[in-house]
Structure formats: C-alpha cells, structure tokens
Image (cartoon, rainbow, N blue to C red):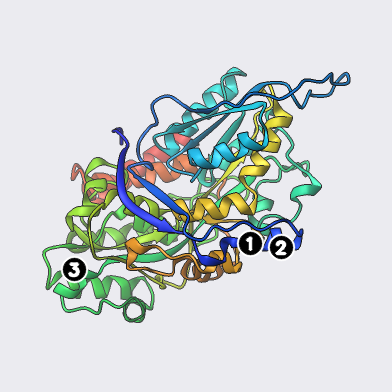
C-alpha cells in the first residue's frame, strides 16, 4: 500500500445550507457563507503513508504567568496527531485550529493502514513514550486497547456529554466509567456499483432500480451476481474478505463470546459464512486481497461490478478511480443493514500536554469538524447532532453520479442493527486469522477450503 500522493481533479461542493450550522444557530453564533467552497480530493490518500508531517506554526501572542499546576495558555507548544488512512483532517482544517490557538503548532502523521497504526500504538504504549499527543484507534482493536485504559487520559467532560451515539460512547467507556476516547466516524453500509458494467450486462443502472434489484438476503445478492457474471467478463464482487466482514458485522457474537472466550472455530455462524463465501467465490469473486495494490488498481479497471460500501469507502473509490465514469451507490444492503468500521481519538497519558491534547481532540470530533470530514472523505459522523442535520443530508458527491450521499448514508446508519457486534480483546487477531484463511483459498490458491479451515483452527489455538 506504499506509494506517493497523487492529486486528482475531482472536486466536491458543499451544500448551500452550510451557511449556518444547526449547532451554531442554537448557540447564536455568527453564520458564515460557505456556498461555493470546494474541497479537493487527494488520490491514494487512504492507502499512502505521508512522508514526514504536516505542520502549522503561528506565532504566539503575548505572554503571561500561569498559576502553579496550571498550563500557561500562551505557552508555545507542539501537538501531534497520528491517524491512518484518511480521517478528513486536511491541512486547511488543522490550520483553522492553529488560527484559533496561535500558540499551538500541529503536526499530523498518517500510518498506511489500521494494522500499522495498531502495531505502533501498542509498541509505544508499552515503552511508555513515543506516541502522538492524539492517537487514532480503529474499532476492531479498541477493546484490546481498553485493557490499558489507565495509560490513557480521561476525556470525560460536560462539554462533550451526549455528543455521540450511545453505542459509540458506551464502547469508549472503561470499567471505572471514564471516557477514554472521542468518536470520529461510523461505517454504515450500502452497495457501490459500476453502472456501466450493469448496463452492458442488461441490468438496471438507476440507483433506485438497483436498490430494488438487490433488496433481499445474502443468497439473493449472490443469485443476482450469478446472473451478472453469465453476461459479463467482470466479477460480481471485489474480495471474499469484504464479504466476510459484511456478514459477521450483522451478528452479535461471532469470533469471541462476551465472557472472553474465542469461539470462532466452533461458532456455526462463522463456519457457515466461510463455506458459503468460498462456494460462491469461484464464479463471483475478483480474487483480490483487500488493501493490496491489485485491489486498489481494480477500482479503475472494471474488474468487478459491486462492492460492499461503508461510508468511508467512498473517498477511497473516488481517489483511486480518477477519471472513471460509472461508479454509483445504491441505498440497499444484504439482510438490511450493517456497520463496518469507525474510529476514535485517544489521548495517551504519556504525552507532554494531555490537557491541550484533550481540547484539540474535542475540537476535531466536534460536529462542525466531522461534517467537513464527511464532505472530504465520506466518513459518516458518529455525532448525534449530525445524524439528521440538513447540512449533512444535502451533501452530494458528483463522482458518484451526483448521489445524495448525505441522505443515503443517514438512512443506512438508521438501518444498522441495534445490537452492535461484540468485539473483544482478541477480535482483531482472530479476524486477521480468518481473513488469511479466505485469502489462502481465493487469492493465493495455496490451500483448499478444508485445508485452510484446519490451518485457521491451528492459528486460533496459538491465540488462546
């Protein structure tokens, strides 16, 4: 996934109603005219490590003496924020913060993947130094981090009370009732598709008609796919790994039980999903390993017709498929709905400026900033104030045939099952082992399904 950042010519237009945000109106803040503001999308930003860091330095004004134990508000400090993929925290957005806080310099670094971010986080957390002041965490390994909540700053504050969806905030609260992370986004899912490939195969292309075509369960999704591949040289879906994510994210207990036991090897739901996916993959899969270079290239080469599409995937598709016409998104998902992914911001206690970092993290995850992140990358906000805000509902993306992504993804978020999947301390490792078992069969073709499942069971034993 390494590479260089390449700039696309794709532009997104903010909706007319961004002149005044609802939370600004409720506080009687002055409104700002945003009509005509554009946000430029960088190609490959979700997959590329950012060499070096982006810094904003503004001269501190004046000086004052702080009381003992207090932080001088005019002290010149540097705050670092570490993310992965693309959280939507553009140079322009961070510059807004440093303009409001002229004594602060902000430096952002981006890991290539969530996997890399996790490895870095736990290595430096154990070492007791080296982490950024604000560190991003992905939901699949958040429970693993929760074990070490004593090494994180308590972010509880009346200023942010009730800011997030209940399940998002509850998952970030430790056993002592401390809020140890601020929610950024969630991953409500739709189906993205290539309308040009649909047309060539005689399928409907209008997004409403596609939604009707695909309405149903996973068997129906695969059945439509069989009809498609019979009339096309393209595959139906991109990756068996993504299909496994989609299936398991609709279940409550899959890989671990709530009492901490790894149950993936004995859970009939997991084994049934494994067998079902690999039974369909010879005909329907593009045989791509998600996050590989071939997978990224396939966004523009027409290798497949559909993919499971959490909101944050929109920015990835748009960045990778520069100049490609035909991508669209349908308001539908097998078995109704599901959530894939979503992240948090944490403040490690080892940092030099935990209170300033807490303030910065609160600013980044405020509705105002998360709306801008949604417009830039498609990351759907976890903030309550934005779930049905007109400013979000009016957002469209020209690249996806002017799809009303704000309204569409808000509906997809409402369709997410009320019972969130349980993800325990070893969820990330178990899911990685399960994904590897699928890859050995569908992509690498080094084992058959029976052999790879046996290898998966051995891998699970090593995790117990």
Residue at x 37% of width, y 41% of height: 45
Is residue 416 something that shows in the picture? no
Is residue 166 something that shows in the picture? yes
Name the residue nearer the viewer: 165 or 23.
23
- Could you tell me how far apart the alpha carbons at marks 1 and 2 are, in whole angstroms? 7 Å
Quarter of the image where one finds residue 20: bottom right
Which sits earlier in the primary sequence, circle 1 or circle 3? 1
Quarter of the image where one finds residue 177: top right
Q: Tag 2: Cα neighbours inside 10 Å, few (<14), some, or many (≥20)?
A: few
Kindly indicate whether the residue at mark 2 contacts the one at mark 1 (C-beta within 8 angstroms). yes
Q: Which mark is on residue 20?
A: 1
Q: Secondary structure at mark 3?
A: helix
Kindly identify which residue carries mark 3: 197
Q: Tag 1: Cα neighbours inside 10 Å, few (<14), some, or many (≥20)?
A: some
Q: Secondary structure at mark 1?
A: loop
Name the residue nearer the viewer: 245 or 72.
72
Kindly indicate whether the residue at mark 3 contacts the one at mark 2 (C-beta within 8 angstroms). no
Which sits earlier in the primary sequence, circle 2 or circle 3? 2
- Could you tell me how far apart the alpha carbons at marks 1 and 3 are, in whole angstroms? 40 Å
Residue at x 36% of width, y 61% of height: 308
Name the residue nearer the viewer: 137 or 330.
330
Kindly identify which residue carries mark 2: 25
On the rendered structure, is 127 left or right of 4?
right
Q: Is residue 197 above or below residue 48?
A: below
Quarter of the rendering occupied by the N terminus: top left
- The mark lying in front, picked from 2 and 3, is 2
Q: Secondary structure at mark 2?
A: helix
Q: Tag 3: Cα neighbours inside 10 Å, few (<14), some, or many (≥20)?
A: many
Kindly indicate whether the residue at mark 3 contacts the one at mark 1 (C-beta within 8 angstroms). no
Query: In the image, residue 186 lies at what x, y percent?
Result: 53, 55
């Amino acid at each position: 996934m390494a590479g260089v950042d390449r700039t696309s010519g794709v532009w997104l237009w903010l909706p007319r109603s961004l002149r005044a945000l609802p939370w600004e109106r409720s506080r009687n803040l002055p409104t700002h005219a945003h009509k005509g503001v554009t946000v430029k999308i960088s190609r490959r930003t979700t997959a590329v490590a950012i060499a070096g860091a982006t810094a904003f330095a503004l001269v501190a004004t004046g000086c004052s003496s702080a009381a003992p134990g207090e932080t001088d508000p005019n002290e010149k400090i540097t705050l670092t924020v570490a993310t992965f993929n693309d959280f939507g925290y553009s140079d322009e957005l961070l510059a807004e913060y440093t303009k409001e806080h002229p004594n602060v310099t902000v430096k952002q670094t981006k890991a290539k993947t969530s996997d890399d971010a996790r490895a870095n986080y736990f290595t430096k957390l154990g070492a007791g130094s080296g982490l950024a002041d604000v560190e991003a965490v992905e939901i699949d390994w958040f429970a693993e981090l929760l074990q070490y909540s004593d090494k994180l700053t308590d972010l509880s504050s009346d200023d942010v009370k009730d800011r997030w969806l209940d399940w998002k905030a509850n998952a970030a609260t430790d056993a002592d009732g401390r809020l140890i992370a601020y929610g950024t986004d969630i991953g409500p899912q739709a189906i993205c598709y290539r309308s040009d490939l649909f047309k060539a195969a005689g399928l409907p292309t209008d997004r409403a008609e596609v939604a009707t075509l695909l309405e149903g369960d996973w068997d129906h999704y695969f059945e439509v796919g069989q009809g498609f591949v019979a009339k096309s040289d393209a595959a139906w879906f991109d990756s068996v790994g993504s299909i496994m994510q989609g299936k398991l994210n609709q279940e409550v207990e899959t890989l671990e039980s709530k009492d901490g036991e790894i149950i993936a090897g004995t859970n009939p739901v997991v084994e049934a999903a494994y067998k079902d996916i690999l039974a369909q993959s010879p005909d329907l899969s593009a045989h791509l390993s998600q996050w590989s270079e071939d997978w990224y290239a396939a966004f523009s080469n027409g290798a497949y017709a559909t993919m499971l599409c959490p909101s944050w995937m929109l920015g990835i598709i748009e960045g990778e498929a520069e100049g490609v016409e035909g991508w669209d998104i349908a308001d539908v998902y097998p078995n109704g709905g599901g959530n894939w992914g979503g992240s948090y911001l944490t403040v490690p206690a080892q940092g030099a400026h935990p209170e300033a970092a807490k303030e910065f993290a609160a600013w980044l995850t405020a509705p105002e900033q998360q709306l801008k992140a949604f417009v830039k990358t498609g990351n759907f906000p976890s903030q309550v104030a934005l779930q049905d805000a007109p400013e979000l509902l009016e957002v469209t993306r020209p690249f996806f045939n002017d799809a009303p992504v704000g309204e569409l993804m808000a509906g997809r978020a409402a369709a997410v099952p009320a019972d969130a999947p349980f993800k325990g301390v070893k969820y990330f490792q178990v899911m990685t082992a399960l994904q590897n078992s699928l890859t050995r069969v569908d992509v690498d073709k080094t084992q058959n399904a029976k052999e790879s499942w046996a290898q998966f069971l051995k891998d699970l034993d090593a995790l117990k």
